[in-house]
Image (tube, grey):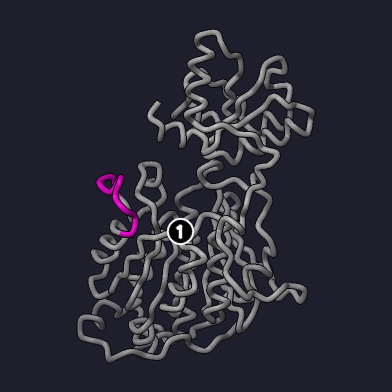
Amino acid sequence: MKLEPLVEPGGELTAEERRRYSRQLLLPEIGEVGQRRLKAARVLVVGAGGLGSPALLYLAAAGIGTIGVVDDDVVDESNLHRQVLHGTADVGRAKVDSAAGAVERANPLVHVVRHRERLTAGNAVELVSGYDLVVDGADNFATRYLVNDACVLAGRPWVWGAVLRFAGQVSVFWDEHGPTYRDLFAEPPAPGTVPSCGEAGVVGGVCAAVGSAMVTEAVKLVTGAGESLLGRVLVHDALAMTWRTLRLARDPRRAPVTEVADAVQLCAVDDADVPELDAVELERRLRERDAGRDEFVLVDVREPDEHAASAIPGSVLVPLADLLADPARVPADRPLVLHCAGGTRSAKALRALRERGRTDVVHLSGGIAAWDALGA
């Protein structure tokens, strides 16, 4: 869809800006006026992870005048293969600080605003309202619905991207001019039905491809160049190396957004039928088992490479897909304690076993992450 430029032109370009952006100034669709629009633009990037990394770097390189980054996480070593903003020396550092440093090194003419906080129902509308446009690189459904609803209430457009394994999607949502994320996905998926990148994996190059497409859409929105992805979804299959476009229209049955719900409410997990234990209780039960006073099987439902990298002593590996395909893969004569990385897959496995009549099953709340945090 062809849209008018989102941002009014800023001040005249300096000689330094003309040199830096000379190749971009040559584009008739951008030119000097378009570059001044980019200079005046304020763009909020949600997440400094796999998608946020290329997005932040290319937004800065394009000359976006003010870039906000919201993220409450710290850099982990497992991030480095795809989150190219961060390096080995940044492990343990706040992502917003690492990201700001990388952006400022890439383009010192850009102003970076750090928001080291989690996006919530309480702050989302205020944060979004301070910017012209949102680029969302979040890796979870709850945050995407928060971004969507906050943008609807604030009257802001946003660029969405998602990646998993070798696949990615990109689109633009703007309630004033076309469909929103809730027209694409009316409700969050059932807990446990869609794995995260931490569970299923992702190729770093896919993050780069999708993140770059997101930035191109952001630049087009700011300057009015070309036709935006509003009303379309771009789907990338890296294994086949294809890009295809799907049409998206408003759902006339969709209820209007009147408030921003908390992330916990948006993607709440019904734990009533998912009995669990915490890491402290598991440690106690493992000691009891070693002493012969308890009997159970600790089942790791992650993938073999995850188990090889880090495992709870005494656990037995039965990947979730194998368990779902053949429940007989787990012992039927002893109680079970299931665990995964964070609790999503083990809860799904537990529900599947209960549907088959097993009542002697619990799962580890928080998964192996909670176990590692315990320092057992």
User: Which residue: 24% across, 75% down?
Assistant: 109
Q: Quadrant of the C terminus?
A: top left
When asked about the image quadrant of residue 39, the answer is bottom left
Q: Position of residue 130 (x, y in %)?
A: 41, 78
Residue 173, horizontal then vertical, whole percent: 58, 74
Residue 262 shows in this picture? yes
Question: In the shown orientation, is residue 352 left or right of residue 288?
Answer: right
Instruction: Determine if residue 241 is in view.
Output: no
Of residue 160 and residue 312, the one placed in the foreground of this image is 312
Splitting the image into 4 quarters, where does residue 335 fall? top right
**Residue 93 falls inside the magenta stretch:** yes
Highlighted magenta segment, given as a residue range: 87-96
Say which residue label 1 marks: 51
Secondary structure under tag 1 reads loop
* Image coords of residue 89 (percent x, y): 25, 46
Residue at 24% in and 80% down? 19
Comparing 327 with 263, the one in front is 263
183 to 6, vertically: above or below:
above
Q: Amino acid at mark 1?
A: Leu
Q: Is residue 311 above or below residue 204?
A: above
